[in-house]
């Protein structure tokens, strides 16, 4: 069984300040983890993914996430927020069992960026 | 390169009716996935098709079904619509499955918003 918990449903930051979106996961297997972003009226776009290689993963648009097995966390960070980062962000887990299975999505965190 | 396309963009139906949603994957992608994004429930996996076959299914009743055509496009059918079926239905595609399909990046379409009255 697997699950993912996004600890904040809504995060508000000022432009130019750091972003932290929190995600904790639970998985019976060593998981693969993803962050997706969804801008209004658009589909989801992959930001980054962890698949048992380096624990610090760099993604697009300056985002990165660190896989911490001891804390079962995969928090998403960005040093300096931009107005265009305002969107909904989804943390996703998939069991890395070697056989295909379904993705489990978190409930999402809405990021608001203010001037 | 064209992305994943879905049609229609919006749809309004009444309870008990049937609906068909369509998805065209990115050229070269053979796997198609369907997700339901309902208010308050987040994104939930519905179905995965690869090479014309259903590979996996989420926790949805049998009135949710679909198919994949030889050109890899896909349809999602929902029979006997209920009010709680109102949601954004997202389709995604990825490169050929192999054994680790869900580790291939999934590219999402813009979705079809279904409203059931």
Image: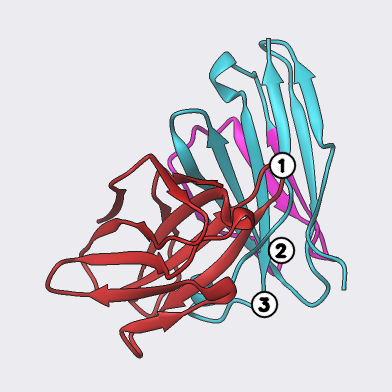
Chain colours: A red, B cyan
Q: Where is residue A51 in the image (x, y as percent from the top left)?
A: 39, 81
For label 2, the residue is B52
Q: In this view, does B103 lie to the left or right of B73?
A: left
Mark-to-mark CA distance, 3 and 1: 24 Å
For label 1, the residue is A41
Q: Residue B109 carries which label?
A: none
- Numbered disc in front, either 2 or 1: 1
Q: In the picture shown, does residue A66 fall above or below B67?
A: below
Q: What element carries label 2?
A: loop
Q: Position of residue A101 (x, y in %)?
A: 43, 64
Mark 2 or mark 3: name the one nearer the start of the chain. Answer: 2
- Numbered disc in front, either 2 or 3: 3
Task: From the viewer's side, name the closer residue of A51 and A61.
Answer: A61
Q: In the picture shown, does residue B55 fall above or below B23?
A: below
Range shown magenta: B50-77
> Which image quadrant is residue B36 in?
top right
Mark-to-mark CA distance, 2 and 3: 14 Å
Query: Mark 2 belongs to which subunit?
Result: B
Q: Decide: marks 2, 3 in contact (CB < 8 A)? A: no
Q: Which mark is residue B95?
A: 3
Crowd rating for badge 3 (residues with CA inside 10 Å; few <14, some 14–19, many 20+) = many
Q: Decide: marks 2, 1 in contact (CB < 8 A)? A: no
Mark-to-mark CA distance, 2 and 1: 29 Å
Query: Mark 1 belongs to which subunit?
Result: A
């Amino acid at each position: 069984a697997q699950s993912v918990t996004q600890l904040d449903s809504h995060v508000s930051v000022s432009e130019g300040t750091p972003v932290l979106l929190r995600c904790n996961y639970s998985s019976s297997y060593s998981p693969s983890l993803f962050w997706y972003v969804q801008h209004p009226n658009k589909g989801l776009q992959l930001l980054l993914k962890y698949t048992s290689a380096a624990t610090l993963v760099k993604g697009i648009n300056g985002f990165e996430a660190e896989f911490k097995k001891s804390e079962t966390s995969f928090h998403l960070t960005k040093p300096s927020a931009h107005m265009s980062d305002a969107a909904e962000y989804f943390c996703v887990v998939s069991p890395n069992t070697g056989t295909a299975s379904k993705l489990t999505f978190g409930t999402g965190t809405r990021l608001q960026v203010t001037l | 390169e064209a992305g994943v396309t879905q049609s229609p963009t919006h749809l309004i139906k009444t309870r008990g009716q049937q609906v068909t949603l369509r998805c065209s994957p990115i050229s070269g992608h053979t796997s198609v996935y369907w997700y339901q994004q309902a208010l308050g429930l987040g994104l939930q996996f519905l179905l995965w098709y690869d090479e014309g076959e259903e590979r996996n299914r989420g926790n949805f009743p049998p009135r949710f079904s679909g198919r994949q055509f030889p050109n890899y496009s896909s349809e999602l059918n929902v029979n006997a619509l209920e009010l709680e079926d109102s949601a954004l239905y997202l389709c995604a595609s990825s490169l050929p499955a192999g054994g680790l399909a869900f580790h291939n990046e999934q590219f999402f379409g813009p979705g079809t918003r279904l409203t059931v009255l």
